[in-house]
Amino acid sequence: MTEPQQAANAGVPDSVAAWEERYAGSDPIWSGNPNEALVAAVSGLTPGRVLDVGCGEGADVIWLAEHGWEATGIDLSQTAVDRATEAAAAKGVTASFEVADVSTWDPSGSESDAGELRRGGYDLVIGCFLHTRLPDTREELVGRVSEHVAPNGRLLLISHAEMPPWAENHDEELGHGLGHHHEPVTPNGDFALLIGGSPVRWEIEFAELRTREVEGPDGQPAELDDSVLLAHRITD
Ligand SMILES: C[S@@+](CC[C@H](N)C(=O)[O-])C[C@H]1O[C@@H](n2cnc3c(N)ncnc32)[C@H](O)[C@@H]1O
Protein backbone atom coordinates (compact mmCIF):
# COMPACT_ATOMS: atom_id res chain seq x y z
CA MET A 1 0.00 0.00 0.00
CA THR A 2 1.32 3.46 -0.85
CA GLU A 3 1.68 6.12 1.82
CA PRO A 4 -1.31 8.22 0.63
CA GLN A 5 -3.47 5.07 0.70
CA GLN A 6 -2.27 4.26 4.21
CA ALA A 7 -3.30 7.73 5.25
CA ALA A 8 -6.65 7.45 3.49
CA ASN A 9 -7.30 4.09 5.10
CA ALA A 10 -6.25 5.15 8.59
CA GLY A 11 -8.84 3.96 11.06
CA VAL A 12 -10.48 1.40 8.76
CA PRO A 13 -9.84 -2.32 8.99
CA ASP A 14 -6.84 -3.73 7.18
CA SER A 15 -8.55 -5.37 4.22
CA VAL A 16 -5.61 -7.59 3.22
CA ALA A 17 -5.48 -9.17 6.66
CA ALA A 18 -9.28 -9.28 6.88
CA TRP A 19 -9.71 -11.09 3.56
CA GLU A 20 -6.90 -13.50 4.34
CA GLU A 21 -8.42 -14.22 7.73
CA ARG A 22 -11.82 -14.81 6.16
CA TYR A 23 -10.48 -17.33 3.63
CA ALA A 24 -8.02 -19.02 5.98
CA GLY A 25 -10.63 -19.30 8.71
CA SER A 26 -13.13 -21.32 6.69
CA ASP A 27 -13.68 -23.98 4.10
CA PRO A 28 -13.95 -22.62 0.54
CA ILE A 29 -16.27 -19.62 0.61
CA TRP A 30 -17.57 -19.55 -2.96
CA SER A 31 -19.51 -22.16 -4.90
CA GLY A 32 -16.78 -23.10 -7.36
CA ASN A 33 -19.15 -22.16 -10.20
CA PRO A 34 -18.58 -19.17 -12.48
CA ASN A 35 -20.77 -16.10 -12.01
CA GLU A 36 -23.81 -16.44 -14.31
CA ALA A 37 -23.65 -12.79 -15.38
CA LEU A 38 -20.02 -13.30 -16.41
CA VAL A 39 -20.86 -16.37 -18.48
CA ALA A 40 -23.68 -14.46 -20.19
CA ALA A 41 -21.53 -11.40 -20.88
CA VAL A 42 -18.42 -13.19 -22.10
CA SER A 43 -19.89 -16.02 -24.14
CA GLY A 44 -20.11 -13.94 -27.34
CA LEU A 45 -16.57 -12.56 -27.12
CA THR A 46 -13.52 -13.84 -28.98
CA PRO A 47 -11.10 -15.29 -26.41
CA GLY A 48 -7.80 -13.52 -25.77
CA ARG A 49 -5.92 -12.48 -22.65
CA VAL A 50 -8.12 -11.98 -19.62
CA LEU A 51 -7.36 -10.63 -16.16
CA ASP A 52 -9.72 -11.29 -13.23
CA VAL A 53 -9.15 -8.76 -10.45
CA GLY A 54 -10.19 -10.10 -7.04
CA CYS A 55 -10.48 -13.62 -8.43
CA GLY A 56 -11.15 -15.23 -5.05
CA GLU A 57 -10.96 -19.01 -5.30
CA GLY A 58 -10.66 -18.85 -9.07
CA ALA A 59 -13.95 -20.23 -10.45
CA ASP A 60 -14.33 -17.48 -13.07
CA VAL A 61 -10.68 -17.74 -14.15
CA ILE A 62 -10.97 -21.51 -14.51
CA TRP A 63 -14.19 -21.21 -16.55
CA LEU A 64 -12.54 -18.61 -18.80
CA ALA A 65 -9.45 -20.80 -19.29
CA GLU A 66 -11.70 -23.74 -20.13
CA HIS A 67 -13.32 -21.55 -22.79
CA GLY A 68 -10.16 -20.60 -24.61
CA TRP A 69 -8.97 -17.56 -22.69
CA GLU A 70 -5.37 -17.09 -21.55
CA ALA A 71 -6.44 -16.36 -18.02
CA THR A 72 -4.80 -14.66 -15.05
CA GLY A 73 -6.34 -13.98 -11.66
CA ILE A 74 -5.04 -11.73 -8.91
CA ASP A 75 -6.28 -11.53 -5.35
CA LEU A 76 -5.18 -10.08 -2.01
CA SER A 77 -5.45 -13.41 -0.22
CA GLN A 78 -2.73 -16.06 -0.33
CA THR A 79 -5.23 -18.72 0.78
CA ALA A 80 -7.66 -17.79 -2.00
CA VAL A 81 -4.87 -17.88 -4.59
CA ASP A 82 -3.64 -21.26 -3.28
CA ARG A 83 -7.18 -22.65 -3.56
CA ALA A 84 -7.55 -21.23 -7.07
CA THR A 85 -4.21 -22.72 -8.15
CA GLU A 86 -5.15 -26.12 -6.71
CA ALA A 87 -8.61 -26.06 -8.30
CA ALA A 88 -7.13 -25.27 -11.72
CA ALA A 89 -4.56 -28.05 -11.36
CA ALA A 90 -7.24 -30.52 -10.25
CA LYS A 91 -9.20 -29.74 -13.42
CA GLY A 92 -6.09 -29.85 -15.61
CA VAL A 93 -6.61 -26.22 -16.59
CA THR A 94 -3.74 -23.85 -17.39
CA ALA A 95 -4.22 -20.49 -15.68
CA SER A 96 -2.04 -18.05 -13.71
CA PHE A 97 -2.78 -16.78 -10.25
CA GLU A 98 -0.92 -14.21 -8.22
CA VAL A 99 -1.26 -12.60 -4.81
CA ALA A 100 -1.50 -8.90 -5.57
CA ASP A 101 -3.33 -5.70 -4.72
CA VAL A 102 -4.71 -4.04 -7.84
CA SER A 103 -3.98 -0.66 -6.23
CA THR A 104 -0.29 -1.21 -6.80
CA TRP A 105 0.04 -4.26 -9.08
CA ASP A 106 2.32 -3.95 -12.09
CA PRO A 107 1.93 -6.92 -14.46
CA SER A 108 5.30 -6.35 -16.06
CA GLY A 109 6.86 -7.42 -12.78
CA SER A 110 4.78 -10.58 -12.66
CA GLU A 111 6.69 -13.86 -12.70
CA SER A 112 3.84 -15.65 -14.43
CA ASP A 113 3.94 -13.35 -17.42
CA ALA A 114 7.74 -13.25 -17.68
CA GLY A 115 7.69 -9.49 -18.05
CA GLU A 116 5.74 -9.55 -21.32
CA LEU A 117 2.74 -7.72 -19.98
CA ARG A 118 2.39 -4.15 -18.94
CA ARG A 119 -0.60 -2.12 -17.86
CA GLY A 120 -3.03 -2.06 -20.78
CA GLY A 121 -2.19 -5.55 -21.98
CA TYR A 122 -5.45 -7.48 -21.50
CA ASP A 123 -8.25 -8.00 -24.02
CA LEU A 124 -10.71 -8.38 -21.17
CA VAL A 125 -10.44 -7.28 -17.56
CA ILE A 126 -13.11 -8.35 -15.11
CA GLY A 127 -13.97 -7.41 -11.56
CA CYS A 128 -16.75 -9.49 -10.02
CA PHE A 129 -18.15 -8.31 -6.71
CA LEU A 130 -15.01 -6.30 -6.14
CA HIS A 131 -16.28 -4.26 -3.21
CA THR A 132 -13.16 -3.16 -1.43
CA ARG A 133 -11.37 -0.38 0.39
CA LEU A 134 -8.16 -1.04 -1.48
CA PRO A 135 -7.95 1.44 -3.14
CA ASP A 136 -9.92 3.78 -0.95
CA THR A 137 -12.66 4.93 -3.35
CA ARG A 138 -14.65 3.18 -6.07
CA GLU A 139 -13.50 5.86 -8.51
CA GLU A 140 -9.87 4.88 -7.89
CA LEU A 141 -10.79 1.21 -8.06
CA VAL A 142 -12.45 1.58 -11.48
CA GLY A 143 -9.38 3.53 -12.63
CA ARG A 144 -6.86 0.96 -11.36
CA VAL A 145 -8.81 -1.97 -12.85
CA SER A 146 -9.51 -0.31 -16.21
CA GLU A 147 -5.91 0.69 -16.87
CA HIS A 148 -5.13 -2.98 -17.59
CA VAL A 149 -7.50 -3.05 -20.59
CA ALA A 150 -5.77 -3.07 -24.00
CA PRO A 151 -6.87 -0.81 -26.87
CA ASN A 152 -10.01 -2.40 -28.38
CA GLY A 153 -10.34 -4.49 -25.18
CA ARG A 154 -13.21 -4.66 -22.73
CA LEU A 155 -13.90 -4.05 -19.06
CA LEU A 156 -16.57 -6.11 -17.30
CA LEU A 157 -17.70 -5.02 -13.84
CA ILE A 158 -20.29 -7.12 -12.02
CA SER A 159 -21.22 -5.74 -8.62
CA HIS A 160 -23.87 -5.76 -5.95
CA ALA A 161 -26.36 -3.06 -6.96
CA GLU A 162 -27.51 -3.41 -3.37
CA MET A 163 -25.77 -5.27 -0.61
CA PRO A 164 -27.54 -8.44 0.53
CA PRO A 165 -29.87 -7.60 3.46
CA TRP A 166 -27.86 -9.85 5.75
CA ALA A 167 -24.39 -8.57 4.71
CA GLU A 168 -23.86 -5.85 7.29
CA ASN A 169 -25.01 -7.91 10.27
CA HIS A 170 -23.15 -10.93 8.99
CA ASP A 171 -19.91 -8.97 8.67
CA GLU A 172 -20.32 -7.66 12.18
CA GLU A 173 -21.15 -11.10 13.57
CA LEU A 174 -18.10 -12.57 11.90
CA GLY A 175 -16.02 -9.61 12.98
CA HIS A 176 -13.98 -9.86 9.81
CA GLY A 177 -14.27 -6.17 8.88
CA LEU A 178 -13.93 -6.79 5.17
CA GLY A 179 -14.27 -3.14 4.41
CA HIS A 180 -17.31 -3.54 2.16
CA HIS A 181 -18.45 -0.31 0.64
CA HIS A 182 -22.18 -0.30 1.12
CA GLU A 183 -23.05 2.49 -1.29
CA PRO A 184 -25.17 1.27 -4.21
CA VAL A 185 -23.35 0.55 -7.46
CA THR A 186 -25.07 1.14 -10.80
CA PRO A 187 -23.77 0.28 -14.26
CA ASN A 188 -24.17 3.87 -15.46
CA GLY A 189 -22.53 5.13 -12.28
CA ASP A 190 -19.54 2.86 -12.89
CA PHE A 191 -19.38 4.06 -16.50
CA ALA A 192 -19.37 7.68 -15.34
CA LEU A 193 -16.47 6.89 -12.98
CA LEU A 194 -14.69 5.10 -15.82
CA ILE A 195 -14.85 7.90 -18.38
CA GLY A 196 -14.33 10.60 -15.76
CA GLY A 197 -10.95 9.21 -14.77
CA SER A 198 -9.67 7.69 -17.99
CA PRO A 199 -7.37 9.28 -20.56
CA VAL A 200 -8.75 6.97 -23.29
CA ARG A 201 -12.18 6.66 -24.90
CA TRP A 202 -14.80 4.11 -23.88
CA GLU A 203 -18.27 3.16 -25.01
CA ILE A 204 -20.95 1.13 -23.25
CA GLU A 205 -21.54 -2.28 -24.79
CA PHE A 206 -24.20 -3.00 -22.23
CA ALA A 207 -25.18 -1.64 -18.85
CA GLU A 208 -27.92 -3.43 -16.99
CA LEU A 209 -29.31 -4.56 -13.68
CA ARG A 210 -29.65 -8.34 -13.52
CA THR A 211 -31.80 -10.03 -10.90
CA ARG A 212 -30.59 -13.19 -9.22
CA GLU A 213 -32.20 -15.55 -6.74
CA VAL A 214 -29.95 -16.21 -3.76
CA GLU A 215 -29.95 -17.85 -0.37
CA GLY A 216 -28.63 -16.10 2.72
CA PRO A 217 -26.27 -17.58 5.32
CA ASP A 218 -29.24 -18.87 7.31
CA GLY A 219 -30.98 -20.29 4.24
CA GLN A 220 -33.25 -17.28 3.75
CA PRO A 221 -34.32 -16.80 0.09
CA ALA A 222 -33.91 -13.37 -1.53
CA GLU A 223 -33.69 -11.67 -4.89
CA LEU A 224 -30.70 -9.42 -5.49
CA ASP A 225 -29.93 -7.01 -8.31
CA ASP A 226 -26.45 -7.09 -9.79
CA SER A 227 -24.98 -4.15 -11.66
CA VAL A 228 -23.39 -5.33 -14.90
CA LEU A 229 -21.29 -3.03 -17.07
CA LEU A 230 -19.46 -4.16 -20.20
CA ALA A 231 -17.44 -1.27 -21.60
CA HIS A 232 -15.34 -1.25 -24.78
CA ARG A 233 -12.07 0.67 -24.97
CA ILE A 234 -12.10 2.46 -28.30
CA THR A 235 -8.92 2.12 -30.32
CA ASP A 236 -6.99 5.39 -30.46
C1 LIG B 1 -16.49 -10.69 -2.79
S1 LIG B 1 -14.99 -11.44 -3.24
C2 LIG B 1 -15.36 -11.92 -4.92
C3 LIG B 1 -14.54 -13.09 -5.41
C4 LIG B 1 -14.83 -13.49 -6.85
N1 LIG B 1 -14.53 -12.42 -7.78
C5 LIG B 1 -16.26 -13.93 -7.01
O1 LIG B 1 -17.03 -13.26 -7.69
O2 LIG B 1 -16.62 -14.97 -6.44
C6 LIG B 1 -13.89 -10.08 -3.46
C7 LIG B 1 -12.45 -10.52 -3.66
O3 LIG B 1 -11.70 -9.38 -4.01
C8 LIG B 1 -10.43 -9.46 -3.38
N2 LIG B 1 -9.89 -8.08 -3.32
C9 LIG B 1 -10.38 -7.04 -2.60
N3 LIG B 1 -9.65 -5.94 -2.82
C10 LIG B 1 -8.68 -6.28 -3.72
C11 LIG B 1 -7.59 -5.58 -4.32
N4 LIG B 1 -7.36 -4.29 -4.05
N5 LIG B 1 -6.77 -6.24 -5.18
C12 LIG B 1 -6.99 -7.56 -5.44
N6 LIG B 1 -8.00 -8.28 -4.90
C13 LIG B 1 -8.84 -7.65 -4.04
C14 LIG B 1 -10.71 -10.11 -2.04
O4 LIG B 1 -9.58 -10.72 -1.48
C15 LIG B 1 -11.81 -11.12 -2.43
O5 LIG B 1 -11.26 -12.37 -2.76
Image: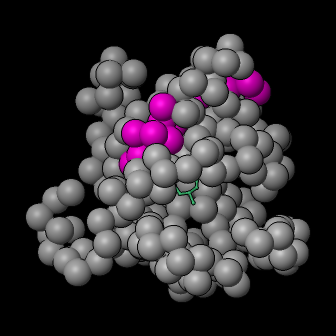
Q: Give left or right: position of 228 versus 191.
A: right
Image point (16%, 59%), residue name = 2
Image point (31%, 72%), residue name = 13
* Magenta region, residue range: 65-82
20, 163: nearer the viewer: 20
Rendered image quadrant of residue 161: bottom right
Image point (77%, 43%), residue name = 33
Question: Which quarter of the figure is the N terminus placed in?
Answer: bottom left
Question: As displayed, is residue 118 above or below residue 7?
Answer: above
For the image, the number of numbered tags is 0
* Residue furthest top in the image: 92
Q: How is the image coloured?
A: one colour
Q: Is residue 105 magenta?
A: no
Q: Position of residue 47 (x, y in %)?
A: 69, 30
Q: Give left or right: position of 95 versus 81.
A: right
Q: Position of residue 62 (x, y in %)?
A: 67, 31
Q: Position of residue 52 (x, y in %)?
A: 55, 43
Question: As displayed, is residue 206 above or below residue 40?
Answer: below
Question: As displayed, is residue 122 above or below residue 23?
Answer: above
Image point (41%, 46%), residue name = 77
Question: As displayed, is residue 74 above or below residue 224?
Answer: above
Q: Is residue 80 magenta?
A: yes
In this rendering, does residue 147 appear at all? Answer: no
Q: Give left or right: position of 31 versus 134.
A: right
